[in-house]
Image (tube, helix red, strand yellow):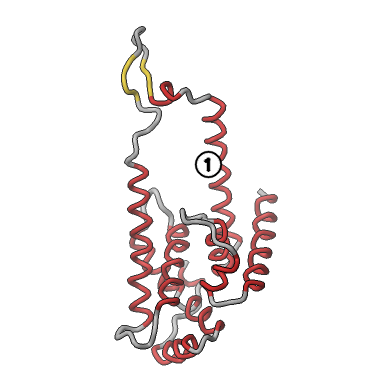
Amino acid sequence: MSSSFPNPLTEEEERYYVKRLEENDPDARLILIERNLRLVAHISKKYVGPMVTQDDLISIGTIGLIKAVNTYTSKKSARLATYAAKCIENEILMSIRASKRIKQEVSLSLPIGTDKDGNEISFIDILGTDADEIVDSISLKIQVGKLHDAINTALTPREKTVIICRYGLEGGDPLPQREIAEFLGISRSYVSRIEKRALEKLKDFLEEK
């Protein structure tokens, strides 16, 4: 998978683009992000498990990479790649910890006792959850799964980043185009074009399924 990403920057190239980044060159920011995506893929491999795919981890790690590029300066003693590796790993670990907390929550269907007739009762029974609501919830999870598949399959890394940030798909708050533009160091209109193109790709992909 990492072979689909561009080659990493040499140390000399990295210094050059960091200098341009500090001169507020938006193209330098994008290059520093894109040329470090292979690093994201490499780090994410360590955390792949039965409940999390590498595609999901790459999406999460990319957010850490963007944060690293946004906060890095040439005054730091470490190279950007070294600094970014820590940010990427931290982002992935935070997501894994959050997932574990969710898994530790008590299942609503877990039996918690019996009624006067000896029948098992659960939290769902106590809460009075309607059966149709449960079906709707399962249907929603299936649709969400299809959407994530479409995002990971049909979109470029840049388009994926914009869509994830724009709609809060990794558990964060949805961000307006203006904030995403500032985050990536590009214009709001450029973010709008990326978002529109990505949504059209997702629509076409899902309609083919």
Place of residue 161 in the rendered image (x, y in percent of width and height, measured from the top left): 53, 65
- Residue depicted at x 47% and y 22%: 128
- Residue depicted at x 31% and y 83%: 78
Image: 141 above or below 56: above
Question: Observer-nearest residue: 97 or 37?
Answer: 97
- Residue depicted at x 47% and y 62%: 59
The residue beneath circle 1 is 141
- Kindly indicate the quadrant of the structure image that contains residue 85: bottom left
Question: Observer-nearest residue: 97 or 43?
Answer: 97
Image: 42 above or below 125: below
Figure disc tally: 1
- Kindly indicate the quadrant of the structure image that contains residue 87: bottom left
Question: Observer-nearest residue: 20 or 81?
Answer: 20
- Kindly indicate the quadrant of the structure image that contains residue 39: bottom left
Place of residue 47 in the rendered image (x, y in percent of width and height, measured from the top left): 34, 59
Instruction: Answer few, some or many: residues within 10 Å of disc 1's Cα (few below 14, many 20 plus, some between 14 and 19).
Output: few
Give the SS element for disc 1.
Answer: helix
Amino acid on which disc 1 is placed: Lys
Image: 91 above or below 129: below
- Residue depicted at x 54% and y 86%: 25
Question: Observer-nearest residue: 206 or 73?
Answer: 73
The residue furthest top is 117
Place of residue 114 in the rendered image (x, y in percent of width and height, measured from the top left): 33, 15
Place of residue 191 in the rendered image (x, y in percent of width and height, measured from the top left): 62, 70
